[in-house]
Image (cartoon, helix red, strand yellow):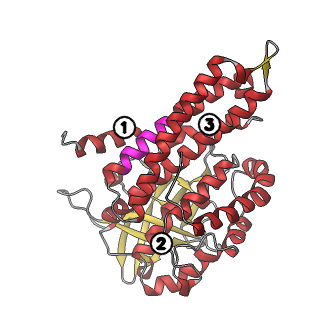
Amino acid sequence: MRRDLFTPDHESFRELVRTFVEKQVVPNYVGWEKEGKLPRELFAEMGELGMLGIALPEEHGGAGLRDYRYNVILQEEAYRAQVTLGTVRTQLDVILPYFLEYANAEQRARWFPGLANGTLLTAVAMTEPGTGSDLAGMRTSAVRDGDEYVLNGAKTFITGGLLADLVIVVARTSTDPENRRAGLTLLVVEDGMPGFERGRMLEKMGCKVQDTMELSFTDVRVPARNRLGEEGAAFGYLGHNLPQERLTVAVGSVAQARAAIAATIDYTKERKAFGTPVASFQNTKFELAAMSAEVEAAQTMIDRAVLDLVDGVLSGADAARVKLFCTETQARVVDRCLQLFGGYGYMMEYPIARLYTDARVARIYAGTSEVMKMIVARDLGLS
């Protein structure tokens, strides 16, 4: 269906990204999957082309465009080529907004040039062993000691933790028995700070090119000048970016579902059963037609939400609706596409297998489908 959210400038950027992905990402992707990470050089190459600094101020090497549509294009073009930019997406869509919103002038001058040119890589450390989606229950602590915070705790499921130069750590700086959400603070831990250790690289079912780590902090002395925003205000900060974070997952889900359909169409046209192309069977036609309709409906939902986000009016409840619908649609579509591949769909040499394993986490991270339903239910006035 016709889309009307992109301008000629966006489409020029799309051509740049498409060429880059085809030349620099696709030929190397299998090797990166085996290594379990993207190379630092990829970030530097993207930074040189201006892909990482779109939203950063011009005085710090960026383009000064706070326009999420450029982020959408990066995801769509990667998934169109049946690859993922993994930790690039996390840095731009999930982590960079915290720096943009809460970094002071000194921090901007110190960090923004490296974020724009791809020489500073980031991670955000929220989730702890045993807490899952319960951010208010986190136990990592930071105690003020003069001009420093003494940080202790452990984090898990940290995307990009392996190569991160800057890790935004959510830590508890005070405790209020009457309000579990109060007392959380954002501290930026820098690579090399004594007591900051990287633990296991976690082996995942999918998203192989996206490193996921355990991190630990033992008496790490973090300068107070590395605090983002006000002390004790982090829970509100985390909530501020959740609509974009959840929309980001939805954008990827729809783009991957679209890629799955395209791969399945190609495969069923070539594959023969009983001497006839599989694409000619009525069941194949009906399945692909139904899936196409679902994806177009999800795409329309995405495009409306993207424009709302750009206009600053996307609500948390609507972001939850979009993530819930789009990730569940992705799950159905990719599963049905794999079925049309038959036994070959179970083989990792075929793209549908990777799309299938990568898809499963979309209904978990950035808030599970069950959490999304709770948010929507509250918006409906159901306590």
Q: Amino acid at mark 3?
A: Thr
Magenta segment: 319-329
Measured as percent of width and height from the top left, residue 348 is found at 74, 34
Mark 2 element type = loop
Magenta stretch: helix, strand or loop mostly: helix
| Mark 1 crowdedness (10 Å alpha carbons): few <14, some 14-19, many ≥20 | few
Q: CA distance from mark 1 to mark 2?
A: 31 Å
Task: Point out the image quarter for the C terminus.
Answer: top left
| Mark 3 crowdedness (10 Å alpha carbons): few <14, some 14-19, many ≥20 | some
- Residues 226 and 309: in front is 309
Q: Residue at x 53, y 68 (%)?
A: 195
Q: Residue at x 31, y 49 (%)?
A: 317
Measured as percent of width and height from the top left, residue 363 is found at 47, 40
- Residues 71 and 119: in front is 71
Which tag, 3 or 1, sits closer to the chain's start?
3
- The residue tagged 3 is 357
- Residues 223 and 255: in front is 255
Mark 3 element type = helix
Q: Residue at x 19, y 57 (%)?
A: 177
Q: CA distance from mark 3 to mark 2?
A: 32 Å
Q: CB atoms at circles 3 and 2 under 8 Å apart?
A: no
- The residue tagged 1 is 370
Q: Amino acid at mark 1?
A: Glu
Q: Residue at x 47, y 75 (%)?
A: 221
| Mark 2 crowdedness (10 Å alpha carbons): few <14, some 14-19, many ≥20 | some
